[in-house]
Structures are given as C-alpha cells and as structure tokens.
Amino acid sequence: SSQRNNPVGGSFRSLAGKVMKAAKGTAEQMTEIALRMSDQTKTQEMATAVCLVSQPVLVDYPGSARYEEWDKTEEVTLTESNEQETLWSIPILLPDASLPEANKDRLIQIRLQLRMSSGSLTSKQYVVGYATFRLSELLNSSTNSQRHFSSPLRSDVLAPQTGATIEIYVVDNKKYPLLGGMGWSLTDPMPDVCGALQAPFCPPLDQIYALKNLQPTQVNESFLGDATAPSFPSGVVLAVERTQESTVILPVSCCVTRLLAEAAMHSANHADSVARQLKANALKFADPFEAYENQHAECVLGLCHLMRSDAQVRAPDNPHQQRLCVVSVSLQSPDCVFELPVGRSQIPVHFGGAQQQQSPNGISYVTTAAISFYPKPANPSYGVLRFEMRPDFDGPSNPPSGGVWEGYAEIDTVRNNPKGAFLEIPMFATHPISRMVATLVIQLTLRNPPPSEIKKNVLSPELGLISLLGMKSLSDSLLDNKAGVATPNTLGDFISTSWIDEHARRRHLDAGNLVSRYESYRLALQRPEPQLALPPHQRKCPSSFRSSASKTETLLSGIPFNTHVQCLVIEPLVVGDNIPCTWHNITCGAAADHPRGFTATGSKPGGAGGVRRLEAKREEIARLSSEAQKQLRDGVQNFLLENKMRRHIPHDDNYTGLLRSTCYRAEQKVIDLTWEIALRRGNVFSQILGTALTAYLAAVSDTTRATPDASSSWIKHGFLLCFEGLLSSAGKETAMIEDAVAAINMLKMVKVELVDGGKFPMGNKSVKVEGSKVVKCIELVREQPCPSIDDVFGNLTLLPQAEESSSLLLRVALDPAFYTNRTPLSLRNGAKVQFYAMLFQMGVDIMQWGANATSSATSKFGSAMQSSEVPSGAKESGGIPFEDDEDDDEMSEPNNDFLVTLNNEAFVKLNKYAFAIRPVEVGAGTITVHSGTGIDPVHPILEKLWRNICDSARKMEHGVLDAAGTVAQNLSGSGVIFCKSGKDRTAMQATLKQAQFLARVGVRKSDRLNILSDATLMRIHGTRLPVCEKNVGQAKYAFNALQAKFMPEMLKPPLGSVAGFLKGGKLFSREGAIES
C-alpha cells in the first residue's frame, strides 16, 4: 500500500504519467487477477512470485483527470484529506510448514513491477520496488498469533519519504479448503495418483481469486469462539476454482459394458435359437437326423407317371416317341394359409382310356423321380399335397388345352403304413370347366419321428440387450418376442432363414466387440496403459479422461467425453465474515455415439440421426409393416373369396407373393433397426451413467446440499439432475441432441445405493475404483425386468415414481469411516435413490443463429433460406462448425422447433418435481402448462423459466438454461453442462454460472456488467483454458472473432483467448486446425 499524500519522485513521474494515460478508459474492463506462480528461480536462497495485477479495488483508478493534471503541472501535492490508499489483494501460497529447518530461513521477496497496460505479456517491465520477508516468521504465524507483517518498499525510483510498504496477512491455506478442496468430492482422485508418469489421472486444475466483497458483510461472532478477530482487511474473499477428473468414470463404463456384453451375447444366442426354430419349421433338411431332432417326419414322394384319360386325346403318331410333363408339388399345411413348395420334376405321360388307369398285366408302377421332404406334425394332420401341371401344348396330334391341372393327396393316408403305398391321384382341368383329364400315379412313404422328451424351445429374450435397455420389440415374430412364441398368425413368420443367419452373425460380432471392450476397460483399471505417458489429447486408451480428439475411437464408445467436476468455493479472508459456500456442476461432452456416425450410410439401418430420430423411424417402419400385413390379409381374403374351392394360396401367386415380399422386408428392417438402436442406446447410456453418478456423489459430498431434508426427498422423489445442453438444432449436432436426450431419459432405469464397504459383501462382478480414497468399488446389477419405453419422445413419469420404473441397481461401496460419519443417515441401510433427469437445450453459436434465421424466414415468407444465406464469411472462417471434430457438420434443414419441444418436455417434468418437493396452493390466475395428463399449474419458482421457454421460439433465449440451473440448485439438485466436446461453449456457460453464483451469494454486484467482468476473468485465468489444452493440446477456445459475434453477449469469449483460424501456425495441415 502506497500513501498518496507523499509526492512521487521525479524520475518516476514521467513513466507513471504515461502508464496512467494508457490505462484511461480501460478500468471497466480491468479487474482483480489471480496469482501466477513461477517455478523458475535464479537462486537457491530466494524464490520469486510474479504477480500480474490490473484494476485496484478502489474507484479512483490511474488515468483519472487528477492524475493527468498532476502529470502536467508537476507541482500538485496529493494530500491525505482527499485521497485514500491504493490496495491490491493478491493471494500467495507459502511452502509447506513441514519444510526442513534449514529451508525455513529462506527469504521471500515480493517485487512490484510496472508495465504498459496496452503492451503484451513480454513487453518491458519496470521494477518499482521490492520488500523482503523471512519465511520462518510467516510459517510460525499460527503459533505466535501474529498474522500481519509489514516491510518497507525498497525502491530506486521512489523518494525515500514516500513510506510505501508491502503488507502481508497470513491465513490458513485456502488452496484446498475443506469444502471444495482436494478430496472434498467422493469422486476426486488422491493426489499421489495424479500427474506422475503413466498416472491414470491428470493433476487437478485450480485457481485462487482474491475478490473485493462489493456487498457489506457482517462478522459472525459465533464462528470466532474465544479467539480474537484478527486485524485482517475486511471485505476481501478468496474464491477457489477447481476442475477435477472423476474416479468413477471408467469403473462405471466397465460395469455397464459388462452388462451390455452379457445381454448382447444372450441376444445373439436368442437369434440362433430363432434361426433353429425357423429351420425346424422348414421342409428341407440336409441331414435326416436333424429333422428327427426337430420332431419332423420323413416323407419320400415318388412320382411315377401321368395317365391321360381324356377321351379327346390320343397317343402320339410315333409309338417310339416319349411324351413328358412337368409336375409341381406343394404342401398345404394346416397352420399356414400359404402353400409350401416341395419340389418339381418331369415324368412320362401315358395315353389311354379309362381301362388303362390300372397297372397293366399286374406289373407294378415304376418311380421315375423321388422327392424327400420333412413335414412337421400339426394337429390334426400333416397336411395335403397339391400337384399341379400346366399342359400348354400337347404336340401336333392334340390341340393346346390351357388352364391348370391339379390334384390332391392327404399325407395322413399313409401315416400308419411304414412301407408306403402307390396312390392314383385324379387330375382335374380347371379351364374352361372342371373336369377330370388324367391320373397321376405316385408312391408316398411316411416315417414318423421317434418319440423324444427333449423340447427345443426358443431362448427367451428377457435377458437380452433389447430388454435390458427397456425397448419394445415392435415385432410379432419370434425374434425378441418376450412371449417366447410368435403371435398366432396363419400368414406365417416374416423372417427368412437366410436373413436370420446373417442377422445372428451380426449380433455375435457386436457381442464380441462388447466383450473385447469390457476386457480393455477391465485391464485398464488393473494396470497402467503405456499411452498414459502421452499428453492427454494424444491418448486413445481407456481412462477416466477421454479427450474430445478421440470422438471416433470405437473402443472408447462407452466412456464419456471430458468429464470434470467444476467447483467454486467462496471463503472470507476474515474468520467469521460468512459461512463458506460452494457451487459445483459437472461439465462434459455430449453423450453421443460418434463412432457409429450421424449420417446415412449404406450399411447403417435407419439412415441419419440419433437415437430419438431412429426411434421415430422405427415406429414408422413398424406401422408400415403392420399396414403391409393388413394388405396381405385383405389380399388373401379376396383370393379365397374369388377361388371358393381353395383353402390355401399357391406359392407362385404373383399378387400375394409381392405383398408377402413387402412384409418380409418391412419386418426384417424393423428388427435390424431395433438392434442398431439398442447398440447406440447402450453406448450413450454407458457414457451418461458415469456422469450422473459423479454428479450424485458430488452432491452427497456437499454438506450444504445433502441435508437431511434433501436426502429424504431424493429417496422419495428421485435425485434431480438438470442437464444444460449448448448444442445447435442444425447439422449433426441435432443428432447429438437426439442421442443425449435418449441417454438422459434412460437414467430413470437406475437406482443408486450407498453401502458400507467394510460390511456389505459385493458380488464377483464388482469393479474396484482405483485412485479414490472413499469409493472402494461399484457394482451394477439388474434389479428387475426393464420397463418398456411407451413413447419415443420420453414418457413423463408421474410423481411419486413407481417401483417398476427402475430396472438397474448401482451399488457404491464407500469407506467405512466416511459411510458412518459423513453419509446422511437417510441414505444408509439400503436406501435407494433414483435419478430424475431432464434436458434443457439451447443453441448458442452461429449455427443456431443460422437455424433461427432460417426458421424465421420460413415462417415469414413460406420458404426456407438456403445454407448460402449463413452470415457472409462464416463458412470461409471455419465458423461452421467451430469445435475440433473429425466428423464435420454439414448445413442441413434446421429444426428449431425441436429445441422448444425438448424444453417443454423438460419443464413439465421439472414442474411436477417442484410441486412434489415444495407443495403450494395455486390461485385462479396461475399460469398453466399442457402435460401428458392434462393441464397443470406452473409452480411459482418456475414462472420465469416458463416465460423464457415461451419466448425461445426462433431465437437464442439463453435465459432458459440460467433459470433451469438456478431452480435445480434451489431444489437440492445438481447440474450438468455439456456441448459437443465439453470444453468451449461449456467453458463459457460454466464461468458465467460461477460469476452469477458470486452475485447470488452477495459477494459481487449482481448487475450484468460485473457478472460479465467476473466471468471474463475466470475465462482468461481460470481452469477452463487448461481443460482445452488437455483436449486439443493448446490452451485456446475453439472460436474465432466471427463466431463470437453471433454468440449471446454473456457467453462471448475474450478475444485474447480464442484460437482464431489456425492452431500452431499450421495453415494447410489437418493437424493444425482446432475447428473443422
């Protein structure tokens, strides 16, 4: 502190005047700044901390008119009567008190340097003066009760009579406060597993801010006890910002992947059993023993000859000429309306009258062709064989007869005759009139299957992947049918044996990939990966931190992106000023399946989109399949009405054959798409569950949030988890939103149980949590059959939630001491907490601006703007998209109404939760909202949020996210902030919420300008830029000036911290681009 009533030396006067001129008009952009420590020391006896200081805390800042006037006259004396001291508050961290005694005699030198405010960090600096303190005196301050130290500022540029001093106030170490410090959250890794070579976790990111408390504070004497309040400067608070990885991310992904692998393998085996069942229903087997195993009879059909008995025909003129005809044979089964083809063959034709129908001279008939088939016994019979001939031309001696000749033979006629028999089948011409024209001689032998007590049933899909993820089959076929049998249908099962073989092979391949992924995750938890020695953004191995640069890595599909616990703790510098308070949220990338892609490819069922859109397509295809089957039933009915003598449809009927082909394609497409969605849902669920558990355990760790009342409401109504999405409703980000909202809705299937790690026996499938001091292991088990998803757009669950709404139980074994002393009593002894999650979504970038502009133009002029109407230069600037991403976005039709729909759904859920937690009486003029059960009143604490949602159509209404996050925290819930990668837009939102928290608790002013100023401070000097460096290798936000121009004012990044167009100066290489 320098007393202004003393004149400043002349040698310093000119320099000071120039600096003050340069600072004029910039005070509103300047603020306090945190300490930056330098680990480079020139001497062993002295360590130097370099502090960059900007705006002083007083309103009278350098550059005012008085300073300029003083610089001109050189005669003005600033007196104590009209001036105050200039005070900067800067946090300095002292070494550990456990240093050897020899090191405690070291000196700490604090040097005051001055440089031009408009210059760069490397511009020339001028030393104003320095002060020296003895380290041992500072370290012993807690024992000798001396907390205040003063030393004169030694200077060559200031006059000796200035009396400038450096004041030091010693406080306890605030870098790791009890609330919000190292290890405060259950998911924090221990320090010894962070930062070392091949360590599984990166070091925690933290920053300390010394902030002037702009609101009046009262000293709370109850916190002082018998101690005397130290003579510290009142009104200064320390804000500790920390960003820490979570230890439960990889273990949760490992547990989920194991469950997915087991379920997928069961689904693959189920498909094999369906394939066997379909083949068992077939008529052809390569091995007769396989037919016997499936309880099929062996039937041998011998075709002898055809005897023409029509009086209008005569034998050929050439007696040596042999006439042949083709006979087609089909089976009319009693359980299917369609005939099954048996075979066809050529047989000789004999001519003669009625007396020639019997065997001449007692000679036995000769079989000229034999066909084997294996009918399945069905009550009441094996069925009927239909023989068909199409005699289009009988040769020069006989005119063409046309029409179809057909005859019938019941298989049951030889059922009890093991040797078989010769049968003479009368053949009738159907055109122009029905008349008998020939006799077909056949030999039929039937061998009944041996009795067997072994019944080969279809493996139940109840434990399969479709059921695990709570999906409906939407198919009446055997595949994925929980009933175990197909819906009774004489139209048959619309699955071909060739297709089911290929589909089962695909399921086995996908299940094998999940098994391999699980093994990789399990081994990564047991031994260090060599890639951990690389920088975080270059790692492609399983770990609790997955960088945004690894989006397309299939092996890492089950691990969430860039998950951190973001925390801000506020503590007063003076003991007893206020109770320490904390704010924490989870930041991460969107739970989206990037490796499976978001665009339509030839091999991807369903085309483009995320889970939500694919679910809608699956519903549509299932509807079309039902319509196709209805058309087929109508076609069959019409055919039987037109052909009243028939009870079956010929297999070669063109019209019904086309309808059947359509039904086959539709049904098989539904099944293919169902499996694709199940795999995608499994991947995003594996990502979202680790993030949700991190948020829950952080809330349990926060003693100010996990109160007895709050924990009791969690058990009764669920743990409120509010997701704040910053993705845009255009391009591939729309598909990412669709994946994320599906994953968030799946959290309702999970309940969390905290158990005593020393007493509760965990199963053999539990996973140890490495690096955690408190969380010992976790286990994910299926508690009961999964609920069905009634609506692809998210069925709204009424409160209180039913027991059937949960299917998975996540057990978390805690350290016995923590479980006994710190865990809320209501959360012990088998208490289970279900997630109650929702998504509020609002795009905040140039892509959303373009989508809003397109929607507005469509509404106003009736036609959509083209992608070329995006702001000039946006594409050339790399403005679309602006994240480091391999899967580039393309401009597509925007869907701005999609965001409104999502926010409406989330609001209805939050409104129900608010009424359940805080019931209130509503009056006649209360605002209402349409819900799934009718019209509900809006809770008073949600009125602002509802107004923001109503105003958000076709514009960036960022207040939706602010209001939703605030309400969630007021209801003892937690928040999760995400964008595509969880580093750029997420950083803007997280720092804004931290600045709003400072204003909300009364530490800083609540006006818009001060909040933006504090947020800018944290964006430049806080922990979010190092998060960017962890992801892409450079501490820059992936924006440029043009992109920032179209962002909401409160989310605009500081221009000095953006990457611009290039990374590392590499212009033409893909490696150098942060943005796509």
Image (tube, rainbow, N blue to C red):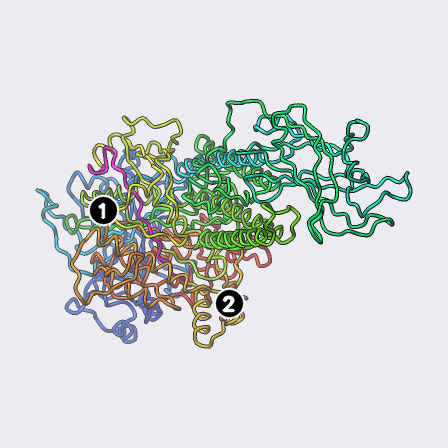
Q: Amino acid at mark 1?
A: Arg
> Furthest-left residue in view?
226
> Could you say which is closer to the camera, residue 1025 or residue 38?
1025
- Give neighbour class at mark 2: few <14, some 14-19, many 20+ (Cα, 10 Å): some
Q: Amino acid at mark 2?
A: Ala
Please determine whether, in this image, residue 31 is positioned above or below residue 803: below
**Residue 993 falls left or right of residue 623:** left
- Image point 32% across, 47% down: which residue? 242
Q: Secondary structure at mark 2?
A: loop
Q: Is residue 112 magenta?
A: no
> Furthest-bottom residue in view?
861
Report x, y in % for residue 978: 39, 53
**Residue 591 falls left or right of residue 668:** left
**Residue 679 falls left or right of residue 8:** right
Disc marking residue 705: 1
Please tell me in which quadrant of the rendered image residue 635 appears: bottom right
- Image point 71% across, 35% down: which residue? 424
> Furthest-front residue in view?
355
Cα separation, mark 1 vs mark 2, equals 44 Å
Q: Which comes sooner in the sequence, label 1 or label 2?
A: 1
Instruction: Residue 598: tell me if it is visible.
Output: no
Query: Magenta residues, as a range?
Result: 823-843
Do residues under tags 1 and 2 come within 8 Å of each other at their CB atoms?
Answer: no
- Image point 32% across, 71% down: which residue? 24
What residue is pinned by disc 2?
874
Q: Secondary structure at mark 1?
A: loop
Residue mark closest to the camera, 1 vs 2: 1
Instruction: Residue 76: tell me if it is visible.
Output: yes
Report x, y in % for residue 285: 64, 31
